[in-house]
Amino acid sequence: MRTSTCAEVEGALYTHPAVLETVAFAVPDDRLGEEVGVAVHLKPDAMLDAPGLREHMGSRLAAFKVPRYVWFLSEPLPRNANGKFLKRELREVLDPASSD
């Protein structure tokens, strides 16, 4: 998935008032090669589910950019010493079968 696509997906996610931080990345897919996956950490006491997130994003992105895989994490997303999200680490830890 292109960096510009990740940035576009993340930008659309950040427009939702419940999202504190999020990161988009490619998830391998047997049929398509790759699909969009996102890890989301919500603001305290915020409520959001995968269908609600997809509905919000559907009005902001082309259909193929709306995440197929969504993981809601209870902890802040992992970052390196420079503050960049560790996408590779997330991709290795998160299992597509466990997404919402």
Image (cartoon, grey):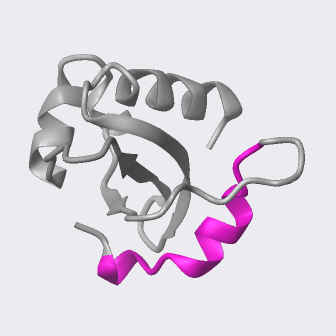
Residue at horizontal 32%, vertical 22%? 61
Question: In the current view of this chain or complex, which residue is farthest to the front?
Answer: 44
Image coords of residue 91 (percent x, y): 60, 68
Image coords of residue 25 (percent x, y): 57, 51
Q: Is residue 18 above or below residue 51?
A: above
The image quarter in which residue 15 lies: top left
Residue at horizontal 52%, vertical 63%? 27
Q: Is residue 34 above or below residue 52?
A: below
Between residue 78 and residue 94, name the one nearer to us. Answer: 78
Between residue 43 and residue 91, name the one nearer to us. Answer: 43
Whether residue 40 appears in magenta in the rendering, the answer is no
Image coords of residue 58 (percent x, y): 19, 28
Between residue 13 and residue 8, name the one nearer to us. Answer: 13
Residue at horizontal 51%, vertical 23%? 8
Q: Which secondary structure dominates the residues rendered in magenta? A: helix
Image coords of residue 82 (percent x, y): 88, 42
Q: Is residue 98 above or below residue 63?
A: below
Residues in magenta?
84-98
The N terminus: image quadrant: top right
